[in-house]
């Protein structure tokens, strides 16, 4: 395939174009329509990132993403009753139904939303974005594609802000604690379709909330593209847990933008699990926006066949006395490959920053590859920062140790890989997410 | 103790894989069920190589001779098959397996002994593990720690003993288990071996050691001195005592005379 010519209007196709924006913006309130159009302009004038850019060096979009062959998913009607949900989705939801509320998103639109009456009585909002446009316009006006992921952050933040079809908004008011997580389950199924959805999570001061997101799809013969944007706004002294498990089928290209704004003395914990899709790109950013903010980021990936995972993370310390800690671990089997590019940025005023970043890779086959590129950019002088990255293979001595206890070579390898990845899960409280991810890892390990 | 030997090697020769020089140059050894044998030798004599060769370490290859375990040709078996038939080697340097708890590891090891499709009963396993830990005076929380991850030297050796207790081998090879241990840790290891052997008197033990001091705590039935890849003297506990006085010097001389002849 030929690379598109450089310059503006790149990525504008027969179906991804102004008419598509028009279809969505028509009938929407002015503020929102304007926001879409501004995003669309940003999209038009931003070139598609090429491998000449450091952040895209190992993921060649001209070869991995065929925008010309994709059509934005139709917006479709509202609710779909659970009987009509795909069995894979129903299965995933059955495995951990216990929650403060649920959102089910099918093919780019929310088809189900529920929230416990207790949470609703405390002022918690859990709704589809389309519903929230009507019911909570002020909330969206302040936060949607505005503070955490404004459209001018790049080609794909602009694309999502222009063409999002639906998504989730979770709002937890001041002093309210959600005792259980909110579960967002997302399913896409049409080949040659492009899906754009968003998640907006707002925890006001002194609130406590938890979100568990799962992304699923079948395998695709023709590429399906899923571009999701997740904005987390964590108010002062709030506590936010966010876990995302991507288990899409082969043939999918998943691009995830995730950004959290962490307020004064607030704590955000997140877990990002990448297991599925042929190509997965995650742009993960945590903004330590006020003194005392803390961000704890865990990541885990397990590639097989010819999967390609590209993780681009940044821990931005904009305020003093903030801490951040990132640990990303991945195993790569078959001909799969991974990229980890992480940066800790410390602004001039961000004294007494504590920031750590670690990426560890385990290659399980001769053809697997991993690029680990940790980085620091420090403009304050009183900080404690460290970064480290490793790419290694299974240790023969460890395998011999396990074999000498009666484990076959295969079992020994699986146990080492399981332990290597479990190490990440063991750093968070046990629960259904851990169990689910463990099961998904087991599934992959059985194929090893 | 007049049964058939559990382990019998004859003229066993071995070298580091892909290297020319042989380290074992013909080792003859017979161990019967319930016997405790000590193999002592200076650094580089091949004593640790013997342990690794018997366990099936891929870093060594057998170049001649034979080794039979419980009537089977040991050299035909893979490392894991040897383990499942009852060979256990306590490592000199146990390896850390991050993220895998001792309990999980042992459960997997016991599961590996079952036929395909047979499932280890988890409650039975818990009972066995707790009972074994009690026998060895270990705290149950020890089994929840990741295998050897951040362990002290003493803890690593305790972990080896615990595995030995759960896996119940017919032959336990202790590869310089005493190296680098302070006297308290040494006593813990010795007490573990003695306890397990008392409980299962048919278990044979092969102690590989440089020093006599371990033998103050584990009483061997036979002591062999290995020098330059060959056993140059075998006898009772008195052999170890004479080593304590005279060291390995006389054996080295003996060996150099033999090679010169």
Image (cartoon, coloured by chain):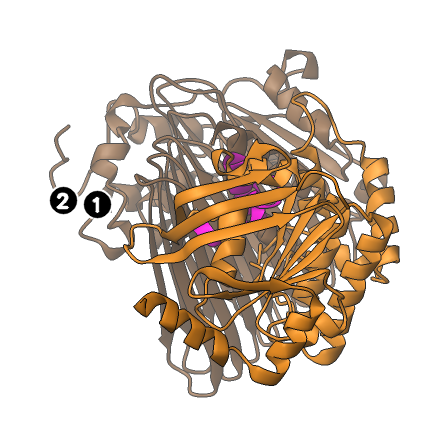
Chain colours: A brown, B orange
Determine the chain carrying the residue at label 1: A
- Where is the C terminus of chain B found, in terms of image quarters? bottom left
Q: Residue at x 58, y 76 (%)?
A: A291
**For this view, does B109 lie left or right of residue A6?**
right
SS of the residue at dot 2? loop
Badge 1 density bin: few <14, some 14–19, many ≥20, Cα 10 Å: some
Residue A256 against residue A376 in the figure, above or below: above
Q: Position of residue B204 (x, y in %)?
A: 71, 50
- Say which mark, if any, is on residue A7: 2
Q: Is residue A258 visible?
A: no
In this view of the protein, which residue sits in the foreground, A167 or A285?
A285
Q: Position of residue A347 (x, y in %)?
A: 42, 77
In this view of the protein, which residue sits in the foreground, A272 or B126?
B126
Q: Which residue is mark 1?
A: A47
Q: Position of residue B232 (x, y in %)?
A: 50, 64
The answer to which quarter of the image holds residue B206 is bottom right
Q: Main secondary structure of the magenta part?
A: helix
The answer to which quarter of the image holds residue B111 is top right
State if disc 2 and disc 1 touch (CB < 8 Å).
yes
Q: Is residue A381 visible?
A: yes
Badge 2 density bin: few <14, some 14–19, many ≥20, Cα 10 Å: few
Q: Residue furthest top?
A: A84
Reply yes or no: does residue A70 show up in magenta: no
Cα gap from disc 1 to disc 2, whole angstroms: 6 Å
Residue stretch rendered in magenta on the structure = A395-420
């Amino acid at each position: 395939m030929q690379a598109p010519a450089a310059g503006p209007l790149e990525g504008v196709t027969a179906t991804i174009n102004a008419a598509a924006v028009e279809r969505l913006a028509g009938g929407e309130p002015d503020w929102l329509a304007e926001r879409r159009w501004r995003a669309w302009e940003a999209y038009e004038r931003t070139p598609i990132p090429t491998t000449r850019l450091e952040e895209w060096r190992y993921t060649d979009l001209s070869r991995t993403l065929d925008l010309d062959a994709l059509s934005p998913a139709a917006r479709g009607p509202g609710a779909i009753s659970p009987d009509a949900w795909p069995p894979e989705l129903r299965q995933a939801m059955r495995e951990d139904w216990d929650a403060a509320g649920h959102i089910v998103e099918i093919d780019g639109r929310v088809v189900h939303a529920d929230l416990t009456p207790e949470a609703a009585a405390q002022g918690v909002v859990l709704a589809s974005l389309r519903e929230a446009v009507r019911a909570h316009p002020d909330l969206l006006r302040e936060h949607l594609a505005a503070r955490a992921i404004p459209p001018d952050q790049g080609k794909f933040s602009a694309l999502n802000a222009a063409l999002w079809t639906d998504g989730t908004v979770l709002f937890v008011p001041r002093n309210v604690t959600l005792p259980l997580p909110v579960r967002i389950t997302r399913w896409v199924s049409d080949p040659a379709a492009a899906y754009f959805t968003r998640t907006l999570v707002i925890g006001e001061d002194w609130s406590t909330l938890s979100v568990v997101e799962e992304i699923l799809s079948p395998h695709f013969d023709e590429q399906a593209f899923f571009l999701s944007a997740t904005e987390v706004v964590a108010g002062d002294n709030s506590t936010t847990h966010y876990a995302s498990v991507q288990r899409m089928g082969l043939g999918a290209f998943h691009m995830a933008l995730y950004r959290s704004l962490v307020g004064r003395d607030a704590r955000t914990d997140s877990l990002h699990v990448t297991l599925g899709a042929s190509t997965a790109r995650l742009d993960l950013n945590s903004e330590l926006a006020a003194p005392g903010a803390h961000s704890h980021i865990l990541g885990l990936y397990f590639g097989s066949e010819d999967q390609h995972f590209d993780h681009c993370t940044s821990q931005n310390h904009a305020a003093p006395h903030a801490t951040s800690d990132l640990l990303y671990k991945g195993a790569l089997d078959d001909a799969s490959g991974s990229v980890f590019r992480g940066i800790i940025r410390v602004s001039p005023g961000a004294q007494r920053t504590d920031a750590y970043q670690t990426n560890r890779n385990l290659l399980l086959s001769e053809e697997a590859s991993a690029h680990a590129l940790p980085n620091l950019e420090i403009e304050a002088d009183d900080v404690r920062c460290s970064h480290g990255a490793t790419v290694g293979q299974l240790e023969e001595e460890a395998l011999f140790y396990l074999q000498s206890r009666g484990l076959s070579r295969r079992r020994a390898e699986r146990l080492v890989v399981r332990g290597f990845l479990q190490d990440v899960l063991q750093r968070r409280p046990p629960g259904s997410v851990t169990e689910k991810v463990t099961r998904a890892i087991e599934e992959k390990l059985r194929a090893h | 103790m007049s049964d058939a030997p559990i382990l019998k090697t004859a003229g066993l020769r071995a070298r580091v894989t892909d290297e020319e020089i042989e380290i074992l140059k013909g080792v003859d050894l017979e161990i019967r069920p319930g016997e405790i044998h000590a193999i002592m030798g200076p650094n580089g004599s091949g004593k640790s190589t013997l342990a690794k060769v018997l366990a099936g370490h891929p870093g060594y290859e057998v170049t001649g001779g034979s080794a039979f375990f419980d009537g089977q040709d040991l050299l035909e078996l893979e490392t894991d098959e040897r383990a499942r038939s009852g060979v256990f080697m306590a490592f000199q340097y146990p390896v850390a397996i991050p993220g895998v708890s001792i309990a999980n590891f042992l459960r997997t090891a016991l599961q590996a002994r079952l036929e395909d499709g047979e499932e280890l009963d988890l409650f039975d396993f818990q009972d066995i593990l707790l009972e074994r830990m009690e026998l060895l005076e270990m705290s149950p929380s020890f089994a929840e720690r990741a295998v050897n991850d951040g362990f002290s030297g003493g803890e690593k050796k305790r972990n080896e003993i615990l595995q030995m207790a759960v896996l119940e081998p017919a032959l336990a090879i202790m590869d310089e288990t005493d190296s680098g241990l302070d006297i308290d840790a040494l006593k813990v290891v010795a007490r573990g071996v003695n306890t397990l052997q008392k409980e299962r008197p048919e278990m044979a033990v092969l102690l590989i050691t440089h020093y006599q001091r371990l033998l103050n705590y584990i009483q061997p039935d036979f002591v062999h001195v290995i020098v330059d890849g060959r056993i140059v003297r075998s006898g009772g506990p008195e052999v170890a005592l004479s080593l304590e006085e005279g060291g390995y010097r006389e054996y080295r001389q003996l060996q150099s005379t033999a090679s010169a002849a």
